[in-house]
Amino acid sequence: MEVQGRIKMVGETQTFGSNGFRKREIVVTTEEQYPQHIMVEFVQDKTDLLNSYKEGQQVKISINLRGREWVNPQGETKYFNSIQGWRIEAVQAEGASGNVPPVPPADAFEPAGDLKEEDHDDLPF
């Protein structure tokens, strides 16, 4: 699955417990009729993927949805969800493709009509 939008916030890396578990959060605002602020967490070695990203950048994040069950001391079962990122890439805004000309559609060219039978197989391999 993927989430795409503009970076609203990139958090600092947090370390938990004696085992050194690391987590870093990023908030992406979707660009749709009703924008959503989606928090995605990157864990362990994936926290370093966020080092080169800044607020305001357009990104696409590959995610996994995680869910877990927890039973509290009173015996009540609770469920928690998280969105975990595993890849992030910058997305160029539409129309900002640089100097690359657009590719014309295949039907924009007329078929050649002056081919001779002996000319059709002149490939060098």
Image (cartoon, rainbow, N blue to C red):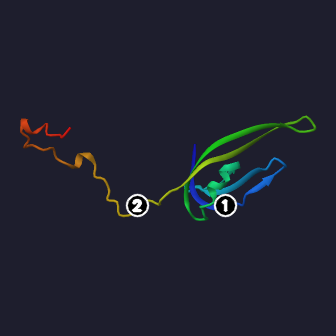
Residue 64: percent from left, percent from top = 64, 42
Mark positioned earlier in the residue sequence (2 or 1): 1
Depth check, front residue: 63 or 30 = 63
Amino acid type of the residue that numbered disc 1 sits on in the rendered structure: Val
Q: Residue shown at 12%/37% (left/top)?
A: 120
Pick the quarter of the image with the N terminus: top right
Q: Quadrant of residue 5?
A: bottom right
- The residue that disc 2 covers is 97
Instruction: Tell me where residue 53 appears, x and y as whole percent.
Output: 60, 61
At x 81%, y 51%, the residue is 16
Provide residue 33's location: percent of width, then percent of height: 55, 55
Q: Is residue 16 left or right of residue 64?
A: right
Where disc 1 sits, the SS reads strand
Q: Residue 10 carries which label?
A: 1
Determine the CA span between mark 2 and mark 1. Answer: 26 Å
Checking the image for residue 102, the label placed there is none
In the image, residue 66 sits, relative to residue 55, either above or below, namely: above
Q: Can residue 37 be seen in this view?
A: no
Q: Residue drawn at (84%, 49%), measured in percent from left and top?
A: 18
Give the residue furthest to the right.
74
